[in-house]
Image: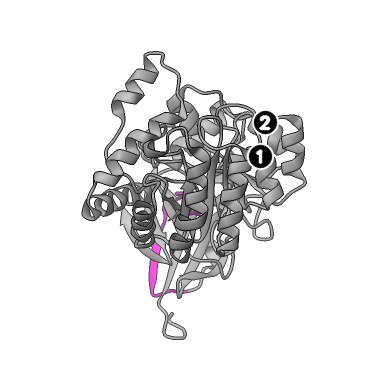
């Protein structure tokens, strides 16, 4: 059936359909069994029982496989040059991670050509799509001067609308010992130049990076330029990042590995999402966040992959879901919600992360009957098909 000039696609005989809409099915995931879903004009047009599915222009019998919303990757660093495999090996041999390793990537990124950076972003986004991520946020932060950050912002914008200016990642080598001078340059020069090409402003509020006052200055300059704040905080130890994010009304504070009871309470009383990045903790042998404490307090939690060359070189949200369940004491349902609807909330998006009527038709199917297999079968390529805007992009 074709209506209003739009071709329709019906997926039928779905073993378990995750809608993330409790009005459409069981629990917070809005689960339906033996279900069907229809896409039309790039959005979800119908959800119901498989036996009741309307005729469509394109029909596919899912053979009992699970269908989920596309994963929403709300934290990634994809514009970079080089790699840091030797640094990873050193950590595995017992060296402790410190934020200073970022400076290695700053040098490599500045030296890379536009074509090299574009090819790297494209490669990593293709990887992300194969793992089921249909929306990907992309940060800058490996240029750390106006020219390089503007270039990184423009390159990221070629691939995603969710561009984050990470204006203050770490002070670059030429500002060694002059962090306040770097902050002044970022506020007065870099942010005004880059803001027209970005949506978000971010800062690494952490020892070895930027303190509370410096981070506040950067975020305030970003907000003045029309950007929405996000924060890297509390990754390496307890610190001011969470409280700063809440004070600034940030959409999310990311990492949140070391938090106090006061931090958890502040998050629970706010709209700021706690984005947990277990892949980074896996790669650095850091402690894992206490997701259970956050969730039990009523904090909204998202899961991100945090792909970057130094501390988490993975694009796989299925891997992060498995880590979240095994190491952070999340249930499989909580982890899946956090990697879909939670990620959407961290990006202030209300059109993705769910498969309810009118939502963007971004979805994936699994070579398994249930979303539970994402944690039950870690390390296995379970994503079989991915749809973006209702169009089948890839099949495995």
Badge number at residue 263 = none
For residue 174, what is the image quadrant? top left
Could you tell me residue 350's position as x and y percent?
60, 63
Q: Is residue 62 magenta?
A: yes
What segment carries the magenta color? 55-72
For the residues labelled 2 and 1, the Cα–Cα distance comes to 8 Å
Residue appearing at x 63%, y 42% in the figure: 213
Label 2 CA crowd tier, 10 Å (few <14, some 14–19, many 20+)? many
For residue 282, say whether it is visible.
Answer: yes
Mark 2 = which residue?
A: 259
Of the 4 image quadrants, the one containing the N terminus is bottom left
Could you tell me residue 338's position as x and y percent?
58, 45
Q: Is residue 312 left or right of residue 338?
A: left
For residue 223, what is the image quadrant? bottom right
Badge number at residue 242 = 1
Element type where label 2 sits in the image: loop
Instruction: Look at the picture and state if 392 lies above or below 346.
Output: below
Residue appearing at x 47%, y 44% in the figure: 182
Q: Is residue 355 left or right of residue 96?
A: right
């Amino acid at each position: 059936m074709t209506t209003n000039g739009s071709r329709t696609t019906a997926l039928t005989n779905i073993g378990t359909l995750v809608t993330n809409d409790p009005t459409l099915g069981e629990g917070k995931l809005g689960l339906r069994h033996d279900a069907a879903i229809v896409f039309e004009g790039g959005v979800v047009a119908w959800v119901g029982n498989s036996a009741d599915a309307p005729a469509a222009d394109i029909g596919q019998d899912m053979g009992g496989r699970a269908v989920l919303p596309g994963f929403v990757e709300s934290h990634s660093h994809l514009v970079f040059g080089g790699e840091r495999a030797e640094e990873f090996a050193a950590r595995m041999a017992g060296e402790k991670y410190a934020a200073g390793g970022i400076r290695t990537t700053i040098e490599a990124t500045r030296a890379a050509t536009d074509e090299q950076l574009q090819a790297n972003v494209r490669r990593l986004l293709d990887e992300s799509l194969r793992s089921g991520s249909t929306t990907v946020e992309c940060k800058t932060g490996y240029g750390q001067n106006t020219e390089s950050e503007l270039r990184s912002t423009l390159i990221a914008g070629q691939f995603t609308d969710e561009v984050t200016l990470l204006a203050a990642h770490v002070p670059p080598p030429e500002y060694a010992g002059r962090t306040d001078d770097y902050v002044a340059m970022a506020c007065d020069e870099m942010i005004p130049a880059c803001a027209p090409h970005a949506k978000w402003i971010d800062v690494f509020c952490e020892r070895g990076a930027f303190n509370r006052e410096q981070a506040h200055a950067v975020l305030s300059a970003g907000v003045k330029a029309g950007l929405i704040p996000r924060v890297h905080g509390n990754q390496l130890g307890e610190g001011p990042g969470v409280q700063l994010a809440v004070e600034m009304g940030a959409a999310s504070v990311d990492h949140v590995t070391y938090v106090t009871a006061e931090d958890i309470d502040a998050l629970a009383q706010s709209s700021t999402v706690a984005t947990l990045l277990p892949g980074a903790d896996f790669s650095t042998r850091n402690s894992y966040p206490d997701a259970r404490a956050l969730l039990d307090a009523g904090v909204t939690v998202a899961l991100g992959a945090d792909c970057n060359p130094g501390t988490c070189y993975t694009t796989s949200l299925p891997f992060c879901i498995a880590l979240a369940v095994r190491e952070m004491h999340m249930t499989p349902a909580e982890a899946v919600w956090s990697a879909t609807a939670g990620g959407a909330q961290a990006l202030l998006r209300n059109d993705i992360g769910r498969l309810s009527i009118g939502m963007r038709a971004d979805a994936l199917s699994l070579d398994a009957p249930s979303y539970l297999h994402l944690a039950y079968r870690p390390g296995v390529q379970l994503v079989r098909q991915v749809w973006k805007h209702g169009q089948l992009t890839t099949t495995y």
